[in-house]
């Protein structure tokens, strides 16, 4: 790597990644804070485990329906305006959760929240392909997606404390949780609108030589992908490889949300206070944060993708299923930490796979399809967990079902056809 390349990548990373990390941190916090609110909200509103699982997951149905149109709109109108719009609407709706008074109102706002947030994550993944050459995407996506476990590492204890605000201003603690954790999204909508740059050609904060180098490098990669695959938007939507990757992502998302939405209640069952539950729940996410960044670097260094994804899914399945074998809280958290490591290390490396053979509008559509179909597990995972809990009286059956989804995903990724571009995630 020469000095010009090193300097350019460093500037891009400093300028773009921290802002996107903070945005995703807030997005994920707004998405999963319902898991902590449930510690007191469910009883207050008379919500059963099955109803909570359905309501937590129903977010992903509208998220699925609006995902592809939203990402194509981002491609057309630019990331700056579209991401700011997404953040503004989801911030307003997340805060509105504080006024829910019934299970039907809970369902309705979760549906609206899914529609509002649709396109944010795949839009960011597509946006990163416009700025970072393929050789850097494993680590860059790892930095960006570290916001997912970090949102729980930091947000879980905060959520536990906010639940203690019962009676302040005549509101319950769970209502304050929704209000206070929605405010950052509204602020960041303005920050994104003022500071985000749509494309490298508009990056006046890069020196002319840096901008020229980056533009040439990305143009070469774009042309290589187009020449190799020549895929239109419609072809990307029905491409077998895209659909196979969606199935792999389905397994990873089933682990992420199937366990994540319920982990506060599992930990609370150890006999802990709400505040202690917040701190203990954060432990697997600390492990996941460190693993995510390290695994992304490792994958880039070895220029290998499929094996890294498969190993992560195997660890996720083993940790989640293994947690059911022990009643001791310490051993359970050790196994949940293994599972969290597996789930989170998969995520950044996985997203190098579709960007290795998709470009332009086809990339925007293909990434959105993978994310949309995969995120249907965000509905199925929590709902299955809740239904099986009501049916069996415990979490073990649901955890076994979730681990099974990870095993299926592992098998599919190993069966993907040999393609050096796909395996290395390079153009």
Image (cartoon, grey):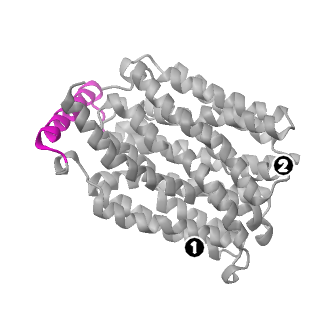
Q: Residue 60 or 43: which is nearer the viewer? A: 43
Q: Residues within 10 Å of mark 1 (few under 14, many from 20)?
A: some
Q: Label 2 belongs to which residue?
A: 270
**Image position, residue 209 (x, y; %):** 12, 38
Q: Earlier in the sequence, mark 1 or mark 2?
A: 1
Contact? badges 1 and 2 (CB < 8 Å)? no
Q: Which quadrant of the figure contains the C terminus?
A: top left
Using the rendered view, name the quadrant where residue 70 is placed: bottom left
Using the rendered view, name the quadrant where residue 357 is placed: top left
Q: Tell me if I can see residue 306 in this picture.
A: yes
From this viewpoint, which residue is outermost toward the bottom? 170
Q: Is residue 91 left or right of residue 178?
A: left
Q: Residue 389 or 139: which is nearer the viewer? A: 139
> Residue at left 31%, top 58%?
80
In the image, is residue 70 above or below residue 422? below
**Image position, residue 26 (x, y; %):** 50, 57
Q: Tell me if I can see residue 131 in this picture.
A: no
The residue segment tinted magenta is 206-232
Q: CA distance from mark 1 to mark 2?
A: 31 Å
Q: Is residue 138 left or right of residue 44?
A: left
Q: Main secondary structure of the magenta part?
A: helix
> Residue at left 57%, top 73%?
96
Q: Label 1 belongs to which residue?
A: 96
Q: Is residue 211 magenta?
A: yes
């Amino acid at each position: 790597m020469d000095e010009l390349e090193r300097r350019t990548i460093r500037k891009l990373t400093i300028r773009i990644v921290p802002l996107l990390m903070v945005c995703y941190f807030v997005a994920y916090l707004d998405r999963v804070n319902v898991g902590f609110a449930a510690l007191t909200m469910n009883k207050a509103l008379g919500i059963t485990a099955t109803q909570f699982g359905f309501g937590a997951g129903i977010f992903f149905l509208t998220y699925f329906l609006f995902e592809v149109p939203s990402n194509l709109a981002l491609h057309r109108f630019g990331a700056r305006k579209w991401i700011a719009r997404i953040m503004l609407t989801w911030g307003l709706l997340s805060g509105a959760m504080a006024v829910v008074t019934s299970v039907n109102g809970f369902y309705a706002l979760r549906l609206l929240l899914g529609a509002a947030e649709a396109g944010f994550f795949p839009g960011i993944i597509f946006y990163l392909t416009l700025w970072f050459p393929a050789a850097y995407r494993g680590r860059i996506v790892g930095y960006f997606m570290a916001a997912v476990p970090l949102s729980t590492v930091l947000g879980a204890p905060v959520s536990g404390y906010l639940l203690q605000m019962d009676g302040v201003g005549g509101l319950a603690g769970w209502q304050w949780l929704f209000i206070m954790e929605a405010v950052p999204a509204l602020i960041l909508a303005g920050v994104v609108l003022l500071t985000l740059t749509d494309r490298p050609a508009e990056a006046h904060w890069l020196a002319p030589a840096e901008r020229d180098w980056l533009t040439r490098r990305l143009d070469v990669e774009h042309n290589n992908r187009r020449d190799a695959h020549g895929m239109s938007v419609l072809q990307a939507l029905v491409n077998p490889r895209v659909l196979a990757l969606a199935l792999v992502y389905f397994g990873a998302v089933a682990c992420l949300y199937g366990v994540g939405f319920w982990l506060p209640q599992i930990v609370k069952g150890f006999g802990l206070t709400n505040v202690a539950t917040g701190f203990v729940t954060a432990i697997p996410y600390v492990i996941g944060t460190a693993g995510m960044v390290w695994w992304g670097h490792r994958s880039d260094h070895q220029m290998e993708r499929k094996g890294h994804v498969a190993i992560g899914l195997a660890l996720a399945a083993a940790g989640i299923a293994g947690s059911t074998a022990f009643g001791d809280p310490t051993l359970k958290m050790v196994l949940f930490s293994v599972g969290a490591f597996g789930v989170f290390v998969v995520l950044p490396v996985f997203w190098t796979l579709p960007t290795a053979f998709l470009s332009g509008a086809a990339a925007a559509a293909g990434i959105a399809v993978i994310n949309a179909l995969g995120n249907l597990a965000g509905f199925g995972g929590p709902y299955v967990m809740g239904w099986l809990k009501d049916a069996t009286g415990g979490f073990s059956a649901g955890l076994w079902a979730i681990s099974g989804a990870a095993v299926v995903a592992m098998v599919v990724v190993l069966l993907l056809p040999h393609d050096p571009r796909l395996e290395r995630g390079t153009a």
